[in-house]
Amino acid sequence: MESECRRAFRGYPGIILILLLLAVVGEFMVRGPLRAVARLPAFNDFAEPYAGSRAWIFGLDPYDPITARYLWQRAGGDAQAGELLAMYPPSSFLVLAPFAALSWPAAMQAWTYTTVALFLLACRGLLQLAGLPWPGRRSAAFLVLAVGLAPIQTGIANGNISVAATMLSILGVWAASRGHNLGAAVFLAAGCALKPQLGIWFLVYYLVRRRWAVAVPALTLVSVCALLAVARLWPAWPMWMQSYMSNYHHWFAVGSIHDFSTENPSWFQLLNLQGLFYVLYKSRVTANVAAWLAFAAGFGVWLYSNRRNRDQHSELLSLSGVVIIALFPVYHRFYDAGLLLLPICWSLRSVQSRLQPVRATALLTLPFLVPGPAIAFRMAKQSGLGTITETGFWKAIVLGHQTWALLLLGCVLLYANMMSLRQPALEAPCERRFW
């Protein structure tokens, strides 16, 4: 093992990779789990699903802000926090019930450690799925990019459930590739139950590929989970649905934190294309139509290429294409860019292939190694650069550069999907050694 490490990392490139890996691991720990634990018992993104799940356990309305705040503070939450307006599906409350049974500080710590563990397992699974052996330079490069992704670090620090949902879905893909169909269905169903707008696209992939042994059990488990979750809320019907709609109108009102227009000061934290198109066209209708047209065109190309191509070696490429274009039309925040793990892994797996988009894919993921728009916004605010921040260039390019990167990445991946029809074997499978 020692001699293999020396051969893999000899020379200046190997030394640089090792130093970069050590640096991003330190950054990950400081910006991720350590920051999450240090903020306790303050409010974060996990507070709303935690309080909602706690209310769900007692058969109360999980979307009522007064009930949610009361239960959260009784469990040890910060007494100075404002209202908790949950927007998560009932199925997520069922999945989070084991954490909601704990006190808030204990639950947040357990959730942080669980999310970190899922992330590490997902990285391990992707390396095995791609056949990248460890020790090796390509596997080390993947770990540098994966551990350095700012959306994952920030998501762990804030306790956002998108990170866990993404990792569970990736673990489902890994389990399916190893022939563990039932285990894959459980992982995929858990990811979809936590965050349907993320997890559903993994199920779409298996449906399009006609992998019924994975898709049917996963859809069944998701449906059962949703039915059980709604059944537990039956005593609170119809109040919980009214509360949910009230919360929805609050969060998506003009100027609110989920609004894609520039009337929302933090609009640049959204990944869906509406924010970028609104800056360009100054029209909500045009922004919505343009985003949905971009998605429809992209999904049509992806569907055409994947119904014709059944090559097992294109699985990472196919999944990368559909999950990235799925970010285009509906609400997605910065944390959801954890899905970039898939195209990063595919690009490093296929770097020796004849497909030209491979290097472009890796380059287009680099803007997500830092929270660039947030840093630029804070620096401009502190420097008092009011006139510059109102220009179209600032909004469309400086604040919107990550959305541009996702749009271009989607186009590159779709082009690669079409090229794979002519070159189905992207590369010879690598040796299946792993750690």
Image (cartoon, rainbow, N blue to C red):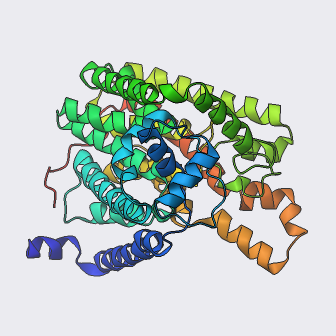
Identify which residue is drawn at 55% across, 37% down: 61
Residue 266's place in the image compared with 248, above or below, is: below
Closer to the camera, 92 or 346? 92
Answer with left or right where residue 405 lies relative to residue 132.
right
Quadrant of image for the N terminus: bottom left
List x then y, in percent, for residue 11: 26, 80
How many numbered marks does the figure carry? 0
Closer to the camera, 377 or 69? 69
Identify which residue is drawn at 34% across, 78% down: 22
Residue 345's place in the image compared with 89, above or below, is: below
Q: In which quarter of the image is residue 30?
A: bottom left
Closer to the camera, 135 or 360? 135
List x then y, in percent, for residue 230: 46, 27
Answer with left or right where residue 19 lies relative to residue 357.
left
Would residue 354 be visible to someone looking at this image? Answer: no
Closer to the camera, 170 or 14? 170
List x then y, in percent, for residue 32: 44, 68
List x then y, in percent, for residue 265: 78, 58
Identify which residue is drawn at 43% across, 25% down: 231
Quadrant of image for the C terminus: bottom left
In this view, which residue lies farthest toward the right? 387
Identify which residue is drawn at 35% across, 33% down: 189
Would residue 90 be visible to someone looking at this image? Answer: yes
